[in-house]
Image: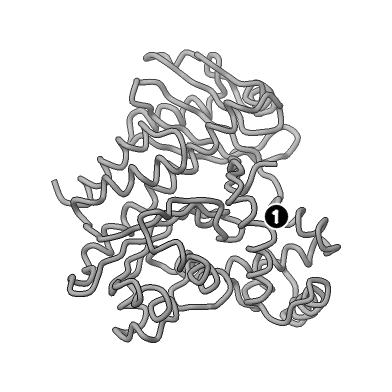
Amino acid sequence: MDPIQRARRRIARVCSETRTPTALLHALREALAPLVPADRWCGLTFDPATTLPTGGVHHEGVAPARVPRLLELEFGGGDINGFADLARRPLPAATLSAATGGRHDASARYRDVFAPEGLQHELRAVFRDEAGAWGGLVLLRGRGARDFSAEETALLAHVSKDACRALRGMLLRAEALGDDGTDGPGLLLLRGAGLALDYANPAAARWLEEIDDCSAGHLPYALHSLALRARHGDGHARARMRTRAGRWLTAHAEAMPDGCISLILEPSRPHEIAQVLAAAYGLTAREAEVVRCVAAGHANAEIARQLGVSRYTVEDHLRNVYAKLAVGSRAALIAKLFHDHYLPRAEAGTAIAGHGGFAR
């Protein structure tokens, strides 16, 4: 079995055995350690709407005294190979050597944090899907150690999707199990050869009634087919469907170690960070959405395409935002967003919701 397949099997096993994001990050690092050794490491969870951190594991990384400078450079300083940039590249993993063309001193992160710590080499990866980056891993090696190879970089890139799927599924299941409401994620557990319904939370019961599809016994045909694909495929399957009211749902099916199939129905919803920004700073809905796009690393032309407006309109929105938040640049804007809305919640241990941002 090749290294990528070994790593993916290890990750699949540890992902099925962990229940919290922190435990998952530890388990991922342990699974990858024999194949990609490192002297130090850290892991993070991200809000996929902004690629700003919601928590993580840091005690095996750099010294605590250097963390403030590291955060300043990562989420406001525009340093080389930042997470937001990496999340939008074709390959979701990269070394600092490759990003700087071998000139490590070109990175402020290296000059101000790594070099004083005796660290020379960095390999980082983001765990991403079409919604954005949900987490990341940073591996570090000291002076005198060999640099991370192209094969090691490729390995992390290959397992990124598996790690993302595990993290996202964990968050959705945790929210569904702890939510008594009917508008959140729905969770169903199916058992046996006939996929008998073993459990459904209140939200799942409601969404099942809303799906406009012929029934295959107790399940709509589309969900029954999805569960079979997960069972007889690689353990995972996903599909989108519309409710009778016209809302979109994304259904995730996953084969669990005990033989059951979990089905999660996730309703589409607006980015909650945009709602928070609008309330906190008096931004319009469109201004708040522009801020979210800026935080995710998009240039003005990209934001214009996403929102269906001109680049000049985006620039007007940004000028209004700068005035309302009393900042003078994109970097200062991201730094304010991080320090005002993400860092306090992360330090307080606020739970992460199924959409990847902080729970209310």
Question: Looking at the image, is 227 positioned above or below residue 23?
Answer: above
Query: Of all residues shown, which one is farthest toward the left?
Result: 1
Q: Describe residue 265's horizontal placement relative to residue 261 as left or right.
A: right
Task: Report the label total.
Answer: 1
Which residue sits at x=58%, y=19%? 200
Q: Residue at x 26, y 58 (%)?
A: 155
Q: Report the quarter where the N terminus lies.
A: top left
Identify the residue at horizontal 48%, vertical 69% (top origin).
Answer: 70
Position of 241 with respect to 285 (left or right) is left
Crowding near pointer 1: few (<14 within 10 Å), some, many (20+)?
A: many
Taking depth in this image into account, of 67 and 271 the one nearest to the observer is 67
Say which quarter of the image contains residue 105: bottom left
Q: Nearer the viewer, residue 160 or 332?
A: 332
Quadrant (top left/top right/bottom left/bottom right) for the C terminus: top right
Q: Name the element at disc 1.
A: helix
The residue under label 1 is which amino acid type?
Answer: Ile
In the rendered image, which quarter is residue 266 located in? top right
Kindly identify which residue carries mark 1.
273
Image coordinates of residue 147 in percent, x first then y, are: 22, 72
Task: Give the answer, above or below, for where 346 lies relative to 90.
Answer: above
